[in-house]
Image: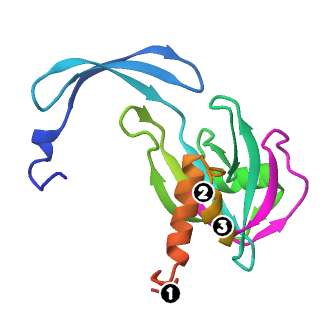
Amino acid sequence: MTRSGDADADAWTVHGERAIYENEWVTVGLADISQPSGDRFEHHTVTLPAAAMTVVLDDAGENVLMSWRHRFVPDVWNWELPGGLLDDGETPAETAAREVEEETGYRPRSIEALVAFEPMVGTVRSAHHVFLARGAEFVGAPEEVNEGRFRWLPLTEVPELIASGKIANSGSLVGLLHVLALSGPSAPSRSE
């Protein structure tokens, strides 16, 4: 834990950074850094585009819209929230609403920011923005056909899905745990 006034002394210094591989999906770099101890060396960096995902609750607030899908890189099947990468000039909230509609065919009745986080803060830059949609209206067939199969799952089943490893995506975990924490017995009311 950094104490007030000690932040500069504890900061790592970046003397420069260069890309060693780059495309539209990922940039791998090497940064010339110094640690607070004075040790200086090159450290790898990975930069990925920012993403937004949404916890979509039904009008009653009892079910969440999720996709059962395969992720080939880790070879994992899991339930995920709708979401995707920010387009140029798009705000995270605009991305969240667009992705819900494109992937599910539902239009959120509202979008509110829950939290933004970095999923691998030690080596990867990739801002993730998580939103909450309270209610959704079906407006037509989904435009995206490779995003898995979406279903409304009871929110009460989410803790067991998490415990059994059936929800493994970081954005989904952060968003759902946030919503569960806000809906628990000690959660503040929406009017507070």
Q: Residues within 10 Å of mark 3 (few under 14, many from 20)?
A: many
- Of labels 1 and 2, earlier in sequence is 2
Mark 3 vs 2: CB contact within 8 A: no
Q: Which mark is residue 191?
A: 1
Q: Residues within 10 Å of mark 1 (few under 14, many from 20)?
A: few
Write the residue at 85% across / 41% down.
Answer: 145
Alpha carbons under labels 1 and 2: distance apart: 29 Å
Mark 1 vs 2: CB contact within 8 A: no
Q: Is residue 77 above or below residue 24?
A: below
Q: Is residue 72 visible?
A: yes
For discs 1 and 2, the disc positioned in front in the rendered view = 2
Q: Is residue 55 above or below residue 88?
A: below
According to the picture, the residue beneath numbered tag 3 turns out to be: 133
In magenta stretch: residue 152: yes
Please give the range of residues in magenta: 130-154
Q: Residue furthest right?
A: 141
* Helix, strand or loop status at disc 2: helix
Q: Amino acid at mark 1?
A: Ser
Write the residue at 12% across / 56% down.
Answer: 4
* Helix, strand or loop status at disc 3: strand
x, y (%) of residue 14? Answer: 24, 26
Q: Which mark is residue 162?
A: 2
Question: In this view of the protein, which residue sits in the foreground, 49 or 180?
Answer: 180
Write the residue at 58% across / 42% down.
Answer: 89
- Of labels 1 and 3, earlier in sequence is 3
Q: Is residue 10 left or right of residue 108?
A: left
Q: Amino acid at mark 2?
A: Ile
